[in-house]
Image (cartoon, rainbow, N blue to C red):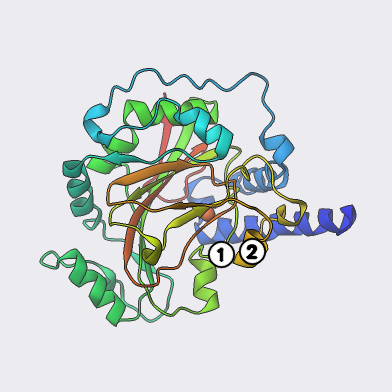
Amino acid sequence: MSFFSFLSRYTLDCFRDTKRIVNYFDLVKLNNILVIPKIFFIKLFYGLSFIRNFRIKPLDINISQLSNSNLFKISPSKEIIKDIDDFGYSKPFMINENLLDSIKNEIFLNQNAEAKIKNINSAQLLKKNDESLNDYFLRLRNSKISRITGYINLKNKSYVRDLLTSDLFLKIASQYLETNKFSINAAYFLSNPLEISEQEKYSNAQYFHWDNDFRKFLKLYIYLTDVDEASGPHIFIPGTHKDKLKEHRLCRLYKDNDIYSAYKNKIIFKGNAGSSFFVDSYGIHKGETPIAKSRLIINVHYGRGKILYTPGDLYYSI
Ligand SMILES: [Fe+2]
């Protein structure tokens, strides 16, 4: 691909993605009209690695006080910021069992689940109070619902909000994003092992891709069920948050073969319920399609500056 052909495709992609995201999340209503040039500017300039990685001073990697150890069975490593910066992901840590149970119970109180398929009424998507998690998974599978997304309202007091706004997580976000002002969004994703169309796979982020929604951002994954090879683990290509091969510098979807043949390492995040990790999703990643078991996860983003994606997002200034 010549430089000019790359440039025109890259710019058109930025237009297309800005339009798609602004419409999908109704961003003008949640923010204001200036969100359109803001997102376009981010996509155009911060999609380029040399701009995104440019730093005036070295990253502050010092996380000395782990004051939130009561939240964890296995605490995040003190090297967490260095790990994310060097490789694009942190070592997994575990939130404690009581907290995990509380979070699992409370996320379904959230009444705004949506599925990316038509002709399903929203009451059908929600977990009933007297239904076990396994029965809920089964009911959805029988209704051929491959995936449910529910946005978590962080404006309400909750266990998940306490965890996401704990001193430690705020410190990790502010140091990695090099700012004291950032936006936080949290959603849960339930994925079922069903034969799905290419279109669903596409909209479920089950193809390799990279994200570019803020000048700098960090994603946190919290597994609420055990995740192994059969239940759709998260997969990340180490180092691609810093640089990608020329052929993957367009913000598009890539087939497994294109990625596996081009990069020699991949990280597959398997772990028991409670297992959690941070990722810089500017690197190439995907959620694998579950093949045998259902999966329930929470996905959080901490993004530099103020862009609200749902009414329940927080804008934090520390
Ligand atoms: Fe993504």
Residue 297 image point, x, y percent: 34, 55
Q: Are the residues at dot 2 and dot 1 in contact (C-beta closer than 8 Å)?
A: yes
| Amino acid of disc 2 | Tyr
Q: Could you say which quadrant of the image residue 46 lies in?
A: top right
Residue beneath the point at 48% across and 25% down: 180
**Callout 1: 10 Å neighbours few (<14), some, many (20+)?**
many
Residue 144: image x %, image y %? 35, 80
Place residue 135 in its image quadrant.
bottom left
Seen in the image, is 295 located left or right of residue 45? Answer: left
| Amino acid marked by disc 1 | Tyr
Ranked by sequence position, the earlier of labels 2 and 1 is 1
- Residue 214 place in picture, x, y as percent: 58, 42
Residue position marked by numbered label 1 in the rendering: 207
Q: Is residue 101 left or right of residue 111?
A: left
Residue placed most toward the observer, 237 or 162 = 237
- Residue appearing at x 64%, y 66% in the figure: 257
Left or right, 217 with respect to 42, comes to: left
Name the mark on residue 126: none
Tell me the SS state at disc 2. Answer: loop
Image quarter of residue 32? top right
Q: Quadrant of the N terminus?
A: bottom right
Residue, disc 2: 254
Residue found 34% across the figure and 18% down from its top: 65
Can the viewer see residue 288 in this picture? yes
Classify mark 2: residues with Cα within 10 Å, few (<14), some (14-19) or many (20+): some
57 shown above or below 291: above
User: In 3D space, how far apart are the residues under numbered discs 2 and 1 (Cα atoms)?
Assistant: 6 Å
Which type of secondary structure does the marked residue at label 1 adopt?
A: loop
Q: Residue at x 48, y 66 (%)?
A: 204
